[in-house]
Image: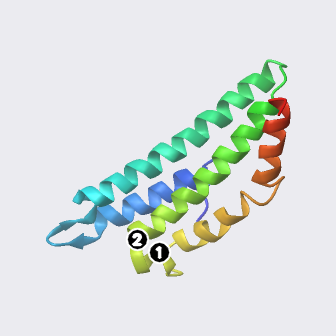
Amino acid sequence: AKQAGISLGKRAVEIARDYATQRVQFGQPISKLQVISHKLADMRRKAEMARLVTYRTAEIMDAGADARMETAIAKVVATDNDFECANIGMQVMGGAGYSMEHDMQRLFRDSRLGPIGGGSNEIQRNIIAKLMEL
């Protein structure tokens, strides 16, 4: 079930972490395998980056300053990172990630819309370039 007030990336981290700490292979949870723990760490880092850039943009807007550059950057970073979190989450979960009993499959599908909708990330890059006077 979707939680209010939580980013797609952060939710993907939670689902993948829960799965990895419960899934046992080779006599231990797969979260103990370095390759899996690094994937989870990367997911957490990407989710946090998305959160921070979004909050920083909100601060600038709240201060009444021109936030066009930061808004475009935040849109690209947040939607790309959400997709990357869902993609890595699918890798962590393997075939279970595709199963309808896990929300990762829905997050993976939902995350694909982010870079396309609401002014595609290519359009956001055009805005960034224009604001850079390129």
| Disc number placed over residue 122 in the picture, else none | none
Quarter of the C terminus within the rendering: top right
Q: Name the amino acid, label 2.
A: Met
| Disc number placed over residue 93 in the picture, else none | 2
Q: Name the amino acid, label 1.
A: Gly
Residue at x 77%, y 40% (from the top left corner): 72
Q: Which residue is mark 1?
A: 97
Question: Number of callouts in the render?
Answer: 2
Q: Quadrant of residue 124?
A: top right
Quarter of the N terminus within the rendering: bottom right
Is 107 placed left or right of 101 in the picture?
Answer: right
Q: Within 10 angstroms of label 2, few (less than 14), some, or many (20 or more) residues?
A: many
Residue 61 pos. (x, y %): 80, 26
Between 128 and 63, the one nearer to me in the picture? 128
> Which element is circle 2 on?
helix
Q: Please, which colouring scheme is shown?
A: rainbow
Residue 134 in view here: yes
Q: Are marks 1 and 2 in contact (CB under 8 Å)?
A: yes
> Which element is circle 1 on?
helix
Residue at x 23%, y 71% (from the top left corner): 24
Residue 68 pos. (x, y %): 83, 32
